Image (cartoon, helix red, strand yellow):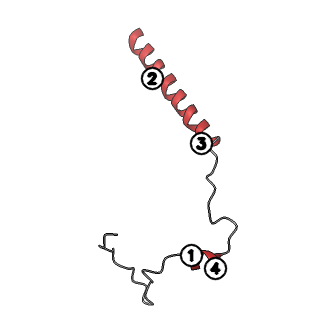
């Protein structure tokens, strides 16, 4: 019984340490700078590719099989 208790305690400590490390990494992460930050919506829409424009009926464009 002592061995099982010791194993459960060590498993708890390992899981708790892992959770603390992951939470710390999430809290201290810095967001990446987005290249479009500060620009207007119109500028972003003009920069977007127009290879597949949605039709008026709302059907999505099929996947392109072209290899570039």
Of callouts 2 and 1, the N-terminal one: 2
Quadrant housing residue 68 = bottom left
Q: Is residue 31 left or right of residue 61?
A: right
Give the SS element for disc 2. helix
List the residue tagged with mark 1: 47
Residue for point 42% across, 89% down: 57
Would you place residue 22 above or below residue 50 in this image?
above
**Res 68 seen here:** yes
Give the SS element for disc 1. helix
Most extreme residue toward the bottom, as rendered? 56
Of callouts 1 and 3, the N-terminal one: 3
Query: 16 and 49: which one is in front?
Result: 49
Give the SS element for disc 4. helix
List x then y, in percent, for residue 3: 39, 11
Q: Is residue 50 left or right of residue 62?
A: right
Of callouts 1 and 4, the N-terminal one: 4
Question: Where is the N terminus found, in terms of image quarters?
Answer: top left
Quadrant housing residue 65 = bottom left
Q: Nearer the viewer, mark 1 or mark 3?
A: 1
Residue for point 43% across, 15% down: 5
Residue 24's disc number:
none
Q: Nearer the viewer, mark 1 or mark 4?
A: 1
- How far is the residue under mark 1 from the one under mark 3? 32 Å
List the residue tagged with mark 4: 42
- How far is the residue under mark 1 from the one under mark 4? 9 Å
């Amino acid at each position: 019984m002592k061995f099982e208790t010791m194993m459960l305690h060590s498993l708890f400590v390992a899981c708790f340490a892992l959770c603390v490390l992951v939470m710390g990494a999430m809290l201290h992460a810095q967001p990446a700078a987005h290249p479009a930050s500060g620009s207007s919506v119109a500028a972003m829409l003009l920069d977007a590719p127009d290879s597949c424009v949605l039709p008026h009926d709302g059907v999505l464009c099929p996947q392109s099989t072209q290899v570039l």
